[in-house]
Amino acid sequence: MRKMKIKIMTGRFLHIAAAGCAALLVTTAQAAAPGITGGTSAPIFDLRAEAARISQPDGATVYSWGYGCNSAPTGFAPAAISGANCPTMQIPGPTLIVHQGDVVTVKLTNNLPAAAGNTSILFPGFAVTATGGSPGILAPEAANGSTVTYTFTASTPGTHAYYSGTQGDLQIEMGLYGALIVLPSTIPTNCTGTSNDQAKTDNGESDYRLAAAAYNHAKSCYDREYLFQFSEMDPRIHSQAEQQANLACAQPNGCMSVETEPYHPAYFMMNGRSFPDNVDPNYASQYPHQPYNANPHMHPGELTLVRQIGTGRWQHPFHEHANHLRVLARDGNLLLTNTSNLAGPLLFTTTSTPGLAMDSLFYWTGKGLNWDVYGHGYAGDTSVCIPDANGYYTSNPAAPNYFEWCGDHDKALEHKPFGQVGSGGPVTLPDPNILANGPWYGGSPYLGPEATQRAVGATPIPPSGTVANSPTDEAGFAFMWHSHNERELTTNNIFPGGLMTLMLVDPRAYKIDEAN
């Protein structure tokens, strides 16, 4: 896999030590919100609950249960993502992608060990009917080797969770959970043909969104989207389940005696993977039962839809560096004023609650930094920034500084690439020999084609124009997104790991290719 060079931003908008570790491990892989489709108007999904082993960055493989495809799905979305597959068991389960108003059918076959007993699926927020199976406390259940079929109308758009309704303390812990994305029935007209859409076209980028809006609301437009399912795992519970998996049993409640308390999780996962595995590509062959990654990218000025689901038992206080997130909805319910304006809060940390799904918008432009993130203002630079009514340069979507905040245009950190405050800048840039040394650091605090030119000094590291510092390669700003529970930044008590990833703000000159 091709490595990328990134700048680890420090200070008010930037993170330090843990992100420095991350810089040495990140690969070029974009997340999007991949999943499976079941056809039009009346989608059908044929799922199976099954056991398999999943891997962790510490080298361990953990016995787990998960939902997967019992037969090939009708299709995959986004269709352009290469190598898409749906194994018979995966964690999280397949992301089910439907449209508002669809009559959805989900068939579930129980292929878990007989000792596990019955299993089921809950679809919270929807009126579900079932055929086959046997009565359960929360939902009709499928006995070992049998099938139950659930049917519901996808009445509410947005992001939703689905998970086992049987022995939740064991079965959800073992991995029986997934996401349901309901796309809106209509797309507001202002969400299509935007200047950001034109910028993608002008720069040769494909569109990997599932839709142009998250809801039937004019302010729910977005340019990119990413799905994050947070979960934790106690390997002691999984070990007990594995040891008892071969017990002969014909009881609906199973024959396992697994202690689920006290609870001491050692693995913390986003989309079924811990850092740094979660920044490897979607459908990477080394994770046959963990197909989804968690590696968001964006360009300045793009609205990024962040879909989040809390799974398991713990809340996870997830902090997104670089900006607050504006909450759009919870469990598909838009948060609106009585005049239908957005009323969701701006959150510094989006705490995931078990079973809760949340949709939010993230935005970054560089406004307020008080310096030109594109490095304009050096000798010979002819770049222009013509402000629109909001102060941004949006009249030329093909420009490498499209969506620049014009108030900071030509405000270079220094008039010389490296030097002292006396050189004419508000700060003194650190010596690259001290700050970083390696092919994944861009060597410059700037975005765009000028970044490499500005990253030269008496001893540039890496040398300008080399493969390690190619002006056409990725040299973005890396903002660390991570749990604010420090233990959750570890994998089996090893740092860095767990609930950690990077939001990469890439220059317009770099094409974000979510097809892997």
Image (tube, grey):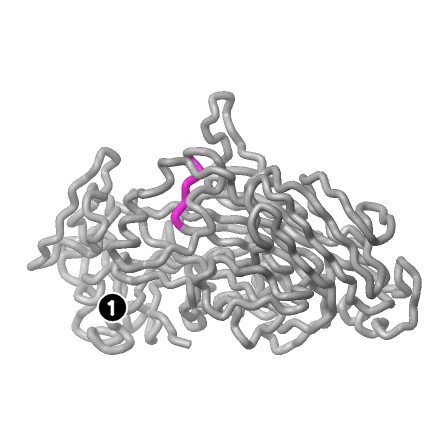
Magenta stretch: give its range.
Answer: 219-223
CA neighbours of label 1 inside 10 A, class few (<14), some (14 to 19), many (20+): some
Whether residue 327 is visible: no
Q: Main secondary structure of the magenta part?
A: loop
Up-down relation of residue 387 to residue 206 (above or below): above
Query: Does the segment drawn in magenta span residue 222?
Result: yes
Number of numbered discs overlaid on the protein picture: 1
420 and 405: which one is in front? Answer: 405
Q: What residue is rendered at 23% in x and 68% in y? A: 471
Query: Does the segment drawn in magenta span residue 259?
Result: no
Q: Which residue is mark 1?
A: 472
Q: What residue is rendered at 51% in x and 60% in y? A: 294
**Quarter of the picture holding the C terminus:** bottom left
Under circle 1, the secondary element is loop
Q: Position of residue 354 (x, y in %)?
A: 67, 48
242 and 129: which one is in front? Answer: 129
Q: Residue furthest top?
A: 338
Q: Position of residue 31 (x, y in %)?
A: 47, 60
Whether residue 232 is visible: yes
429 and 508: which one is in front? Answer: 508
Q: Position of residue 201 (x, y in %)?
A: 28, 54
- Image quadrant where residue 87 sits: bottom right
- Image quadrant where residue 264 sits: bottom right
Q: What residue is rendered at 31% in x and 62% in y? A: 511
